[in-house]
Image (spheres, helix red, strand yellow):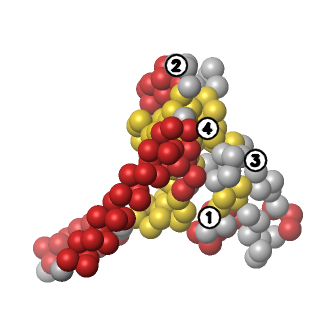
């Protein structure tokens, strides 16, 4: 009897902690404006009403970026999380306030070293749920030049033409 209970508990534990990823929102503009060199997952420190608003999908990445401080902290700035409509008015927050990213010291040191290079920046790419936790995917990026953007448009048009020709062929 005891063997059955332990087996059942481990199965529930595994099922509970291996939940999939649910993407809340992606930063589509980032892939158009930047070349993403490296990606990293970070936790984010949020208030209770902010968590509810993120789960509702009230997130906007426009003009958001990650800043690093000298005392090895990472902050996401400009990220707009809308006000949760069912929250208590006494617990209101500023929608564009700075929010701390939860990274290890060595991860921040690595990013700090790479950002000091010319033209490098850190931008948020996506917000998603990994089980019960809210995670932010950040990317080390370099700005695209105009001719890079043109090449991307040409390649996208060529891929679309190839796909259309293959569809007609079969």
State which tag comes first along the sequence, 4 or 1: 1
Q: Position of 58 compared to 166: left or right?
A: right
State which tag comes first along the sequence, 1 or 3: 1
Badge 1 vs badge 3, beta-carbon distance below 8 Å? no
> Residue beneath label 4, please?
66
Residue at position x 61%, y 29% from top? 68
Q: Position of 137 compared to 77: left or right?
A: left
Q: Secondary structure at mark 4?
A: strand
Q: CA distance from mark 3 to mark 4?
A: 13 Å
State which tag comes first along the sequence, 3 or 4: 4
Which numbered mark, 4 or 2, is in the foreground of this view? 2
Q: Quadrant of the N terminus?
A: bottom left
Q: Please say whether residue 46 is visible from this viewpoint.
A: no
> Residue beneath label 3, please?
97
State which tag comes first along the sequence, 2 or 1: 1
Q: Quadrant of the C terminus?
A: bottom left
Q: Determine crowd level at label 4: few under 14, some 14-19, many 20+ residues with C-alpha closer than 10 A.
A: many
> Residue beneath label 1, please?
54
Q: Secondary structure at mark 3?
A: loop
- For the residue pair 149 and 107, the one nearer the viewer reads as 149
State which tag comes first along the sequence, 4 or 2: 4
Which numbered mark, 2 or 1, is in the foreground of this view? 2
Which numbered mark, 3 or 4, is in the foreground of this view? 4
Whether 140 is drawn above or below 134: the answer is: above
């Amino acid at each position: 009897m005891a063997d059955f209970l332990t087996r059942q508990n481990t199965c529930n534990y595994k099922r509970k902690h291996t939940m999939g990823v649910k993407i809340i929102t992606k930063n589509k503009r980032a892939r158009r404006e930047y070349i993403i060199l490296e990606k990293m997952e970070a936790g984010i420190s949020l208030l209770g009403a902010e968590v509810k608003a993120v789960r509702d999908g009230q997130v906007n990445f426009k003009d958001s970026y990650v800043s690093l401080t000298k005392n090895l902290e990472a902050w996401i700035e400009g990220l707009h999380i809308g006000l949760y409509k069912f929250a208590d008015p006494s617990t209101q927050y500023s929608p564009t306030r700075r929010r701390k990213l939860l990274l290890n010291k060595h991860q921040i040191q690595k990013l700090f070293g790479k950002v000091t290079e010319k033209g490098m920046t850190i931008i948020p790419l996506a917000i998603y749920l990994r089980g019960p936790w809210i995670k932010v995917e950040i990317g080390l990026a370099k700005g695209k030049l105009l001719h890079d953007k043109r090449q991307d448009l040409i390649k996208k048009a060529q891929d679309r033409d190839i796909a259309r020709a293959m569809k007609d062929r079969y």
